[in-house]
Image (tube, rainbow, N blue to C red):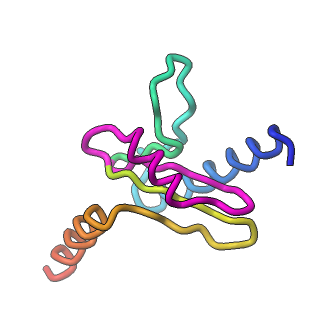
Amino acid sequence: MSGLMSRRKGARFEREMVKRFRDVFGEDVRRGLQSRSGEEVPDVDVPCFWVECKRERRTSPKKALAQAIGDATKGRIPIAVCKDDRCEPTVTMLLDDFLEVIGEWWEASKR
């Protein structure tokens, strides 16, 4: 696949993820367009997460998460959303971050 086709495939996936995250977080979610200043921005800008999206024939979730961890700003939980061709998207995050998020959900669900 050419570089242009690959970039288009990735951009389509990012727009799809914006729609999916908006279903949960509302209109504050947008695609993090690359900055001309060189400042790092997430692929999908969600208030509490730093989302790195990868859409390839065979993704590397560990590499995508490492990129999200390296780029994430303080206060944002880094996650990688990866989709291999003809497969469902998956989310990868650090165990401590997962337990923090799921723990908050669990406590709220018991009320």
Q: How many marks?
A: 0
Tell me what residue is drawn at x 53 percent, y 59 percent.
Answer: 81
Residue 68 in the figure: left or right of residue 2 = left
Residue 50 in the figure: left or right of residue 55 = left
Image location of residue 51, percent across then percent down? 46, 50
Tell me what residue is drawn at x 68 percent, y 44 percent.
Answer: 11
Query: In front here: 10 or 64?
Result: 64
Image location of residue 76, percent across then percent down? 31, 46
Tell me what residue is drawn at x 61 percent, y 49 percent.
Answer: 14
Q: Does residue 2 sit above or below 100 in this rendering?
A: above
Residue 60 is one of the magenta-drawn residues: yes
- The quadrant in which residue 25 appears is bottom left
Residue 86 in the figure: left or right of residue 47 = right
Image location of residue 66, percent across then percent down? 45, 50
Residue 7 is one of the magenta-drawn residues: no
Image location of residue 69, percent across then percent down? 39, 47
The region drawn magenta spans: 48-76
Q: Tell me the quadrant of the picture where the C terminus can be found.
A: bottom left
Q: Does residue 78 sit above or below 2 in this rendering?
A: below
Q: Does residue 15 sit above or below 101 in this rendering?
A: above
> Please, which residue is most extreme toward the top here?
37
- The quadrant in which residue 57 appears is bottom right
Tell me what residue is drawn at x 80 percent, y 39 percent.
Answer: 3
Q: Does residue 89 sit above or below 37 in this rendering?
A: below
> Please, which residue is most extreme toward the bottom here?
110
Query: In front here: 105 or 69?
Result: 69
> Please, which residue is most extreme toward the right here?
1
